[in-house]
Amino acid sequence: MLIRPARADDRSAIWSVIGPTIAAGETNAIDRNATEAEGLAYWLGGDNEVFVAEEGGTILGTYYLRPNQGGGGRHVCNGGYMTSMEARGRGVARAMCEHSLNLARAKGYRAIQFNFVVSTNERAVKLWQSLGFDIVGRLPGAFAHPACGYVDALVMFRTL
Amino acid sequence: MLIRPARADDRSAIWSVIGPTIAAGETNAIDRNATEAEGLAYWLGGDNEVFVAEEGGTILGTYYLRPNQGGGGRHVCNGGYMTSMEARGRGVARAMCEHSLNLARAKGYRAIQFNFVVSTNERAVKLWQSLGFDIVGRLPGAFAHPACGYVDALVMFRTL
């Protein structure tokens, strides 16, 4: 698996990864009805530095890294990760997160923060914990899950 | 004191409130060197609904309210509040926060979250606690304070 910076011609492959997860609405605070243009604007916009995980010419996952805050909060970064439905369970998210931790260190960040990990996404919570993230906050009922109703979201943090 | 929606002709008065606080760099994760245009873009931009606290024609403070997340996180709002240096200690922030809690309820939000309260800003922490906010998260060393070095930032939350 190769993890490399996203190129302009990866846009439709990136949407094929993130679109179904956004539409499911179970793990991310993005409008479930986001169009391709809106979803890609969210993923590729702002200060996001975007990467893809590729195997045999197929994009299996994508992640972004960005500063989590400005000014005096700029030494902490934020990352977002999505794996295609078809590539689940193959360590793609783990590989992307490890890649992002190395990138973040290389860029001089002192820590990485996830602002909104949906508590029912237990697989993700465990993965991030196994990669050294701590749960440093719990937001009560902050996520409206399409099946479970209002569930907590977690703030997770890792010093680099 | 009248708290009312900001108008286009309040821009320079709003900058006179937020500019010195931004430049001090002690309480907010905004670039200390932000220009007036950048500072106003931050304060007035995006989905922010902006209000001012006015007394005898003078703007004493300003606040914004916005959704804190999109999609399944859209029922929790976020607020930011600044009082002019000259009007400190007169209850302006308290009045603006109470106004924002009422506005948030009226708009149907279920909760309000502050993502980044600098822990050394004890006056603000106590004020928010007195208004019913709980500390639900602590971000270790997430803020580079110009005098104190790396200090924690707090996540505060209040159900509406």
Image (spheres, coloured by chain):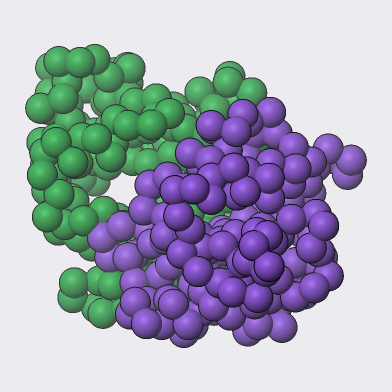
Chain colours: A purple, B green
Q: Is residue A122 above or below residue B61?
A: below
**Foreground of the two, A54 or A119:** A54
- The percent coordinates of residue B157 (x first, y second) are 58, 50
**Foreground of the two, A144 or A95:** A95
Q: Is residue B116 above or below residue A136?
A: above
Q: Quadrant of the N terminus of chain A?
A: bottom right
- The percent coordinates of residue B138 (x first, y second) are 52, 69
- The percent coordinates of residue B49 (x first, y second) are 39, 25
Q: How many marks?
A: 0
Quadrant of the rendered image containing residue B92: top left
Q: Is residue A40 above or below residue A78?
A: above
Quadrant of the rendered image containing residue A122: bottom right
Give me the residue at 73% from left, 51% from top.
A27
Q: Mark yes or no: residue A45 visible.
A: yes
Quadrant of the rendered image containing residue A54: bottom right
**Foreground of the two, A46 or A146:** A46
Quick one: which residue is furthest to the right in this view? Answer: A147
Instruction: Locate residue B88 relative to residue A137 in the image: left or right.
Output: left
Q: Mark yes or no: residue B111 visible.
A: no
Give me the residue at 32% from left, 65% from top.
A74
Give me the residue at 42% from left, 60% from top.
A49
**Foreground of the two, B91 or B73:** B73
Give me the residue at 68% from left, 67% from top.
A56
- The percent coordinates of residue B105 (x first, y second) are 60, 25
Instruction: Locate residue A35 relative to residue B86 in the image: left or right.
Output: right
